Image (tube, helix red, strand yellow):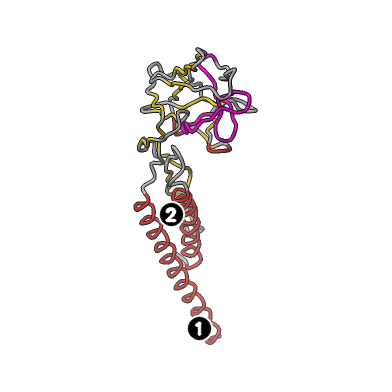
Amino acid sequence: MSVETAILVGLSRQVALKRQMEVVANNIANMNTTAYRAESILFREYLVTSPTGDKVSYVEDYGIARDLREGAMEATSNSLDVAISGPGYFVVEGNDGPRYTRNGHLRLDDEGQLVTQDGAPLQDRDGQVIQFENPTVEVTISRDGTITAADGESFTLAVVSFDNEQALQKAANGLYKTDQAPTPVEAPQILQGMLEASNVQPIVQMTRLIDIQRAYEGTQKMMNADHDLQRDAIGRIGRVS
């Protein structure tokens, strides 16, 4: 392998490590974000045929995998906090189509609509916005997602699942979007007064960040050594000529 090729291989490795470092740092930043799912980079080998006919192996990051394990359930004092135990996502009304989330930190806005903390309305099983006549009404939420107000109004939260959760794409405000057709969860397990914590393991992520930094520095040392060899070879050729 030529010195130039070795440097290019090192650069491809550094680019992948930099991307991995960004993802791990984002996991750490979201360790306290409700229902956040930790992410990791997917890598693969990328073979290139050199001018001499040799196969040169580069590293390429080609996607992100999401850790779909459920986070811990944490009790709150808010009757409008809800968590999904098991599979499923709440359906949120978006400007250009439905959005999905497991973050059940909800509230009633001034118009009595049940919304996320960012003001996006939640949908019921019929695809309609959930709106109470009294915006200060007390509600009870049963395990199947039925919301009953003190004055008798009743709605049922839409809870859906997908064939491929990994294909869900990030949207604004911590929501997800997808072209997949959602499937209603027949028997959702909704917990009132609870929130799902992030499933990020801080110690694991910090250790991973340190390992990535060391790998990046090690690759840089290797590239510096190759560069020194190239510079030394050029110097020797110049003295001989």
Question: What residue does disc 2 label?
Answer: 57
User: What secondary structure is the magenta-colored segment mainly?
Assistant: loop
Instruction: Specify the segment rendered in magenta.
Output: 98-126
Asked if residue 120 is among those painted magenta in the image, a careful observer would answer yes
In the image, what residue type sits under mark 2?
A: Ser
Q: Is residue 38 left or right of residue 100?
A: left
Residue at 47% of width from left, 33% of height from top?
A: 103
Using the image as rendered, state which of residue 222 and residue 72 is in the foreground.
72
Spot the residue most to the right. 95
Report helix, strand or loop for mark 1: helix
Identify whether 156 is placed above or below 18: above
Q: Residues within 10 Å of mark 2 (few under 14, many from 20)?
A: some
Q: Which mark is residue 236?
A: 1
Cα–Cα span, label 2 and label 1: 30 Å
Using the image as rendered, state which of residue 216 and residue 70 is in the foreground.
70
Residue at 42% of width from left, 46% of height from top?
A: 40
Q: Earlier in the sequence, mark 2 or mark 1?
A: 2
Query: Where, by quadrant of the figure, is residue 79 drawn?
Result: top left
Task: Tell me how many marks there are.
Answer: 2
In the image, what residue type sits under mark 1?
A: Arg
